Image: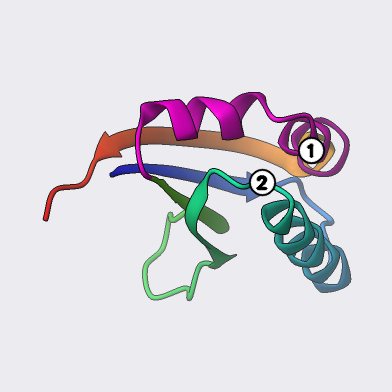
């Protein structure tokens, strides 16, 4: 299994209503992408200073599934039109999950 983790910080002034809208759009996007084996996202719980504001995790059966998600027009659209204008910092990793 391949796990994709992306964390980001919002630009100053991003409202809770905007974050709620982003969450709804992420859920709608995920429903349209067949290669997803699991999809979770949410805000940081603020247990530690210095964390990113939000995280998305996505699981795939294999690398081909991840690549299909990465290049899917629905995913590309959400990233470019919904997320990109709101993100001040981003970090991502993909790794193999065993067991």
**Which residue occupies the foreground of this view, 44 or 66?**
66
Mark 2: few/some/many CA within 10 Å (<14, 14-19, 20+): some
Q: Quadrant of residue 8?
A: top right
Q: Nearer the viewer, mark 2 or mark 1?
A: 2
Q: Is residue 65 above or below residue 51?
A: above
Kindly indicate whether the residue at mark 1 contacts the one at mark 2 (C-beta within 8 angstroms): yes
The answer to if 76 sits in the magenta stretch is yes
Stretch of the chain drawn in magenta: 61-83
**Left-right relation of 87 to 98:** right
Quadrant in the picture for the C terminus: bottom left
Q: In front here: 33 or 19?
A: 33
* Residue placed most toward the observer, 20 or 40: 40
The image quadrant that residue 27 belongs to is bottom right
Residue closest to the far left? 99
Q: Main secondary structure of the magenta part?
A: helix
* Residue 14 horizontal/vertical position (percent): 82, 57
Q: Quadrant of residue 94?
A: top left
Q: Which residue is under mark 1?
A: 74
Farthest residue to the front: give it: 34
Q: Is residue 93 above or below residue 5?
A: above
x, y percent for residue 22:
79, 59
Task: Name above or below for residue 68 compared with residue 44.
Answer: above
In the image, taking residue 99 as reference, residue 34 lies left or right, namely right
Left of 95 or right of it: where is 13? right
Gap in Å between the C-alphas at discs 2 and 1? 8 Å
């Amino acid at each position: 299994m391949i796990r994709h983790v992306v964390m980001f910080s919002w630009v100053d002034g991003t409202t809770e209503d905007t974050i709620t809208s982003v969450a709804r759009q992420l859920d709608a996007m995920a429903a349209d992408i067949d290669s997803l084996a699991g999809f979770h996202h949410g805000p940081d719980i603020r247990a530690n200073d210095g964390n990113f504001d939000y995280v998305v995790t996505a699981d795939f059966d294999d690398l081909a599934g991840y690549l299909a998600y990465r290049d899917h027009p629905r995913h590309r659209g959400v990233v470019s039109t919904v997320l990109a204008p709101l993100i001040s910092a981003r970090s991502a990793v993909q790794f193999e999950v065993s067991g």
